[in-house]
Image: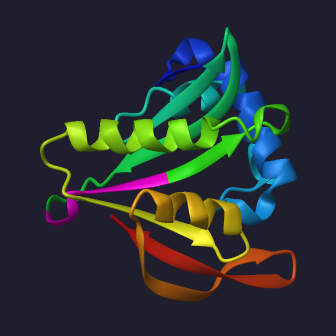
Amino acid sequence: MIVRRLTVDDWEAFKNVRLEALELEPQAFGDSYGVLSKKKDSYWKKELSKRKQVWYGAFDSDKLVGIGSIKYVKSLKFSHIAHLSGIYVIKSHRGQGIGKLLFKTRIEEAFKNDKIKKLKLIVNTSQTNAISLYKSFNFREVGRLEAEFKLGEIFCDAILMEL
């Protein structure tokens, strides 16, 4: 298994995995399948060329099987913080430690930047496996956000975690 930064050349595989994530696990992400599924190819290429949000992929041979991002804050006052988001492993490859490897790699990559002193993430309270993974890397709960996600007419709470 190889984890590396995704490039513009990976846009089509990235699009497929990202859309699968949004369609199958809508409660886990802030973005919407309905919105992103209508985006043109240029959108997906641009997503992978951003400097402030870097996407990583886990590859089984040459097949993209997992994704996750690091978002760096632009504001000078908050430039010491990076946000981890968008982690997803395709169903056929779950239970193999890929999510853990993706998460570990993003933590290491974020802290390679000397400016980064803190990592943050937000997780839906229903994502118990994700919460357990984050806690295993010493992320701690620092707050609860009521009605943070809206899925149709249902509101879901979230946990704010930091390392």
Res. 49 in view? yes
Locate the N terminus and report the quarter of the image it occupies: top right
Q: Is residue 81 magenta?
A: yes
For residue 34, above or below residue 139: above
Residue at image coords 83%, 39%: 91
Residue at image coords 14%, 48%: 115
Drawn side of residue 160 relative to residue 75, left or right: right
Q: Which residues are magenta?
A: 77-84
Could you tell me how many numbered marks the image carries?
0
In the figure, residue 38 lies in which quadrant?
top right
Residue at image coords 54%, 34%: 47
- Comparing 17 with 135, the one in front is 135
The spot of residue 118 in percent (x, y) is 26, 61
Drawn side of residue 16 relative to residue 53, left or right: right
In the figure, residue 105 lies in which quadrant?
top left
The spot of residue 133 in percent (x, y) is 56, 57
Locate the C terminus and report the quarter of the image it occupies: bottom left
Res. 39 in view? no
